[in-house]
Amino acid sequence: MKAGTLRQILLITDGCSNHGEEPSAMAELAREQGITINVIGVMENDVIDEKGLKEIEKIAGSGGGVSQVVYSQQLSQTVQMVTQKAMTQTIQGVINRELQQILGDSKTMEDLPPDKRGEVMEVVDELGETSKLEVLILVDTSASMKHKLPTVKDSLLDLSLSMNARMGDSRFSVFVFPGKRNDVEKLLDWTPNLEALTATFPKLSTGGLTPTGPAIREALTHFNKKRSLRGLLSHDDEQYFEESM
Amino acid sequence: MMMNNTLRNQCKLLPGSLVTGKWNKNQYKIIKELGCGANGIVYLVESGNRHYALKLSDNGTSIISEMNILKSFSKVQGSTLGPSFLEADDFMKTGKQLPFYVMEYIHGHDFLRFIDKKGSSWIGVLMLQLLTSLSALHSNGWVFGDLKPENLIVTSPAYKVRCVDVGGTTLIGRSVKEFTEFFDRGYWGLGSRKADPQYDLFAVAMIIINSAYSGRFQKKGEGYKQLNDLIKQKKELHPYRKMLDKALRGQYDSAIQMREDLVTVLSKQNHSRKKGPNQTATGQQQTVQPSTRQARRSQNQSKKKSGGFFETFLLVAIISMLYVLYIYEQLL
Ligand SMILES: Nc1ncnc2c1ncn2[C@@H]1O[C@H](COP(=O)(O)OP(=O)(O)OP(=O)(O)O)[C@@H](O)[C@H]1O
Ligand SMILES: [Mg+2]
């Protein structure tokens, strides 16, 4: 057992999927593989309807992550908040499981006196600062998102600024859906630096369909490939965090 | 980011109500709400005829990290920057456990209100004080992080500047996780969010700029140029120009260095006219949402207290195990 890599998908969308697999089923699949899904619903002048809202919550619920609906002006702070909150949540989940094993069933951090909780929290904070982090960003580029994309780009640059200030390594990759030919298209492969987005992002063409489910499924394989490669080199422990949620 | 509504409702307490700790059984009577932010509500409370500030939250994690920071502050000798820590406990409210902590109540006006009332000639003096306190904090290995006028309280009768809200306080070398965009050098494209003394000094410069304007600005294009233009547009900022520029660019090695330059500016200014309360600014600015970005917090270095419980032993064991594993990973 060791502090492995925290893996997340960050889905940025403004409404409902209308094509392919059920997104929350795909989110469940992600969770099974130890990948957390966070969802941010972006509004501008429009409001996300009841159905879209439900879907957003459901995906994050199934994906063991955090969801939040915001106006695009607040996107930067929300992206950072959601990412960090989900990291803490995952780490806490692991630590709570450890506590339960040692202290007996149904004991969690909340059952400890505040002083002891403080000590556990130090470990959670330490791990949050030092763990490796991989975030696959999945951006909805259906037509209604078009004029929100510049803000999305800024918020992603801001996210890399925050995450790269940590002691642990962070890596990002960016996918958009729908893609030109497929449901999903890769914009940027794993990199610690999102600067390259500045060139590609404004040129994106927007499409009509919103294949959220297929996009999540595709995104997962992007993690998988990498993991099986590394699996040859490292212990099972590597999946310490991934299995925890 | 504003606290969500359920949190607000859950933590809402009326004046006169009593908060009793689940563990320590101490009782606090709510006098009034002092303020609320992303992580909870702060109340003025009374206990044993003394006043305290009590922060109540439904978010166990961030409030516990904050408590850790406050505790380790109390151990930093001679630090008068933040409030001192009293105790932490849980409040059971209709079956739900709400964590809270109690700290020193810092009585006074927030920085901008104070400047409004007493005039801008106080800005320099108060910033001198702040830089002295920051210097002590930095030499203890910490960076304040979320420096902004709302988190500065000027006490009276002796005017002293103090800071509340240590949520952004970070060990040097780690990432600042709670900050407010306008005062954050990363937002303006002028540096990273890794905690170093220069991070705070940038915010001090922004506080001075902010106090010459009545609102805040959003970044448009190149941050450094925009800030420079803002400084140029305000006559009262001209004497500080060189110092502000150095702070914005992270060119001060320490708070003391910046303080020395400020002393020089202020002693030259002695003969120039005293400025009245600040004027309203040009039409250019927009008010930006002022509240702190909420996120996970930094940790503290405080030493563990020894206790005789079995639980303590287990916890220490778990914690050491996690550390060992962590180190083990680093070796691979
Ligand atoms: N010790 C104290 N003494 C007096 N006033 C205090 C104290 N602590 C907090 N306050 C008041 O309560 C307000 C909110 O507290 P605080 O900033 O800690 O909350 P927060 O949830 O962290 O808010 P933010 O969104 O700014 O991070 C402060 O701006 C200040 O006015
Ligand atoms: Mg605050």
Image: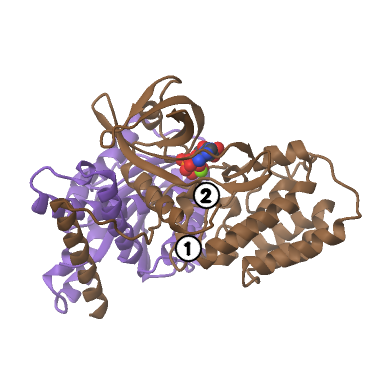
Residue identifier under label 2: B82
Residue A13 location (% of width, % of height) = 38, 46
Determine the chain carrying the residue at label 1.
Answer: A
Residue identifier under label 1: A161
**Cβ atoms at labels 1 and 2 below 8 Å apart:** no
Question: As shown in the figure, which amino acid type bears the numbered disc 2?
Answer: Gly
Badge 1 and badge 2 both on one subunit = no
In the rendered image of the structure, the colour used to display chain A is: purple
Residue B312 location (% of width, % of height) = 19, 54
Picture residue at 18% right of the left edge, 50% below the top: A96
Q: Determine the CA span between mark 1 and mark 2.
A: 28 Å
Where, by quadrant of the figure, is residue B266 drawn? bottom right
Question: As shown in the figure, which amino acid type bears the numbered disc 1?
Answer: Leu
Give left or right: position of B60 versus A47: left
In the rendered image of the structure, the colour used to display chain B is: brown
Q: Can you say which quadrant of the picture contains the C terminus of chain B?
A: bottom left
- Tell me the element at label 1: helix
Picture residue at 79% right of the left edge, 55% below the top: B237
Vertical relation: A42 (above or below) B202: above
| Nearer to the camera, B45 or A41 | B45
Give left or right: position of A171 versus B112: left
- Tell me the element at label 2: loop
Vertical relation: A110 (above or below) A222: above
Where, by quadrant of the figure, is residue B115 drawn? top right
Residue B16 location (% of width, % of height) = 43, 19
Give left or right: position of B311 versus A185: left
Q: Within 10 Å of the Cα at label 1, are there few (<14), some (14-19), or many (20+) other Cα atoms?
A: many
